[in-house]
Amino acid sequence: MTDQTDVAALAEQVPDGALVALPPDYSFVPMELIRALIRRGVKDLHAIAVPVSGMAADLLIGAGCLRVMEAAAVSLGEAGLAPSFTRGVQDGSLTMKDSTCPAIHTALQASEKGVPFMPLGGIIGSDIVKYRNDWKVVDDPMGEGNGRILLVPAIRPDVAFVHAPLADRHGNIWVGKRHELFTIAHAAKTTLATYEELHDGDLTEDPVLSAGTIPAMYIGGLARAVEGAKPLGLAGSYGADMDHIRAYAKEARTQEGFDAYLKREVLGGQAEAAS
Amino acid sequence: MADYSSEEFLISVITGLLPEKGNAAVGAASPVPGSAVLLKRELTGGALRASLIQGTANNPFTDGGRELFDAAGQGRIDVFFLGGVQIDGQANLNLVGTGAYPALERRFPGSFGSPYMYFTVPNVILFRPEHTRRVFVEKVDFISAPGVSPPDVHRIGGPKALVTELCLMSFDRDKGRFRLESVHPGHSVEEVRDNTGFDFDVPDNVPTTAEPSDEMLGVLRSKIGREIAGTYPDFAERVLGYRAEMTA
């Protein structure tokens, strides 16, 4: 049985310096947990986007919680460039490990299988390979005449973050077809999940819902967070608040603007109480 | 000839490059390629499959973010679209930024899946409307995805064509060079040369790119607006005049 707690207590379970996995903005991001992590003052995180991130990464970067970002891309999508990410790379305060979508998926699949690395086609000749000293290009070791091939080391996150539409009293969570969340839950040492609604019954016993269910054995902590993905969307429940995201993209172009957003939207009463 | 917008024209140019059958996949934030693929699907009676990765409409993927890449690696994707902050004469793509890596002068989002899709999809169409020397450079500052590969690297896929606001080019993978195929109505070969930072082949006679037919525009506006609205409602309304019915 996975203990039920609250979002602030979940955030306490993430140690400084942890390698944390972030879902992409279209896939059930636990934004309330991200805000709670900032309120808890988490430091030196190494975030791996699976395989891209936007609001979640940008808030953590702007708030000074991240030391390293690894991603195939960081962007606010239709709202444009991710302002804190862009500023952090350009002024050198953020270390960016550039990757590519299938390399991140493949490295997580290596962890799912418990093997130290996996091969991946393509990619060779990209400058990404040049700057990734943890990647290796080898001659096809099976001698099948396929020439050179790229090997990427397994990525094993300390913690994966997920916001699920449903959870049950047994600690199972339902994420439907967002199977990259299965991958990060399998690959990570533990997964901290928030959820929208409590399902009355056992998700693993439901013949329809079980196919989209991540079982409790992967879940290290669970807390309810109603509208916990906002301002991002939760497919099937609510859409992204594009006005909010566009306003953020504009306001956070300067660190002062970001700080004002943070105080208003994230720190809230805490900032008032501390002053 | 009917009036049409620049986006409708570019949709028509891309539609003309698409095959009669197979599977055309479209990445995120790509309403023009997405509309072209949906139009070609309509014109081929469904023989060309449309696989959009953004949103839920016309999105056939059910196995998470990796499925597109796994499908491409197996040869299940025949057509894909890529762009770039910079593109050079060897069709190298830069989606990372300008200046010296890693402390770039201007940082852009990142490479996404470009260095994999470029190797695995046989027909990659490069789509970059802005045709300037800022975009089309002699050599990109960062190679997200290389245009050509040496023989000891297994490669099925690569660039076939480049569509911009000025012209259509093809890419010869053996020569590693672009060739001007046609210039859009109202533009000239000189204008293309003046705004391109790399050298490319120019045939003796360069035709003018065909304009969309009334029939094609009719199908686009009557049927594709509704389809693309499922993924890009603002684009469907602004470009194709389709306004989704509000349901109370």
Image (tube, rainbow, N blue to C red):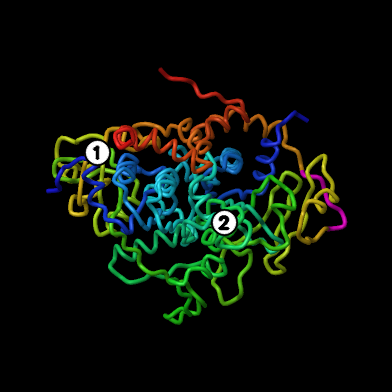
Q: Which amino acid does label 1 sit on?
A: Leu
Side (left or right) of B103 relative to A268: right
Q: Does the magenta stretch include residue B175?
A: no
Residue A91 image point, x, y percent: 54, 55
Helix, strand or loop under label 2: loop
Say whether marks 2 and 1 touch (CB < 8 Å).
Answer: no
**Chain holding disc 1:** A
Helix, strand or loop under label 1: strand
Label 2 sits on residue: B96
**Chain holding disc 2:** B
Side (left or right) of B209 relative to B64: right
Q: Which residue is drawn at 38% across and 44% down?
A: A27
Q: Is residue A176 visible?
A: no
Side (left or right) of A156 relative to B196: left
Query: Up-down: is B187 above or below B159?
Result: above
The quarter of the picture where residue B43 lies is top right
Region of the chain picked out in magenta, as a range: B203-209
Label 1 sits on residue: A166
